[in-house]
Amino acid sequence: MAPAATDAVNGLIGSEVGTYVHRVLERPKVMPSDHPNKVHDWSGWPKFTPKAKPDLKRSVIKPTRLPRIVHVNSHEFRPIMELQINIHGRFMQPAPSIQLSHLMDDLQYTVWLTFTDVKDGRCAGQYSHPESPRPGSSWNGKVVSFDQVKLFSDEGYGQQPGPPVTLKIDSTYRVQVNVGAVNDSGHILSRTVFRKFIGHSFIAVSHACRNVPSLSQVLAHSRKKKVR
């Protein structure tokens, strides 16, 4: 390709993608690698303009305000309550509703629930609000409801991973709401996380399934039939 044509193609590419494309350089007749034991004169080699401030990094916005979480429907939560669960999942009733404030407008925030076993402190599940992440300006002053979170019984799953929130019948849990800023990759920044417990203790129950065989019992019974 002729030099004029090469310049035209490079100029066209640069105009389309909005970036500068260097001209195609001809390979020197003698390369330094051809004579590795000699001292070479680099003055004749092409020089490129160095980048302005190559070590300049993107400034990180640090939160300067402590988030505030207000439990809007706290009147619906008693000191000791029952959480209805089953193997097919039950919507949490009552579902926590909170109001957020004091979030920084320029940061993206994720809001989620954490279910913790009171006895051993084990995390039994987490549920992220479907609208997460959103800018702080969108969360501030808004009432956020977790009416879509489903609670499942751990019966029938065994060692297999269950749904996001899988609880044990007759176990006691605490529910915690969390809000934290996320970076450009979507990872939550731990130093920005603010937590607050919702209500007091909750006991996981399954009244509807008290007299109904569990999923594991049904599967075991079906295996016996096949053997026969």
Image: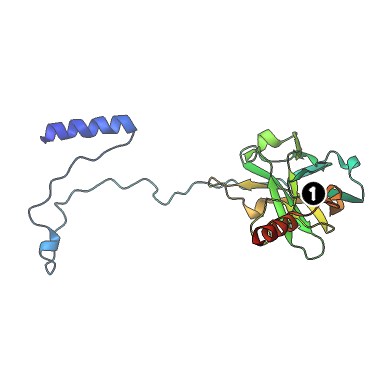
State how the image is colored: rainbow
Q: Which residue is mark 1?
A: 85
At 10% from the left edge and 65% from the top edge, which residue is drawn? Answer: 35
Residue 68 percent location from the top left of the image = 77, 44
Nearer to us in this view, 58 or 99: 99
Q: Is residue 214 above or below residue 181?
A: below
Q: Amino acid at mark 1?
A: Ile
At 67% from the left edge and 59% from the top edge, which residue is drawn? Answer: 223
Residue 187 percent location from the top left of the image = 58, 50
Q: Report helix, strand or loop for mark 1.
A: loop
In the rendered image, which quarter contains the C terminus? bottom right
Mark 1: few/some/many CA within 10 Å (<14, 14-19, 20+): many
At 24% from the left edge and 31% from the top edge, which residue is drawn? Answer: 11
At 79% from the left edge and 54% from the top edge, which residue is drawn? Answer: 213
User: Would residue 13 be found to the left or right of residue 157 on screen?
Assistant: left
Residue 8 percent location from the top left of the image = 19, 30
Q: Which quadrant holds residue 203?
A: bottom right
Residue 166 percent location from the top left of the image = 73, 53
Most distant residue in the bottom direction: 37
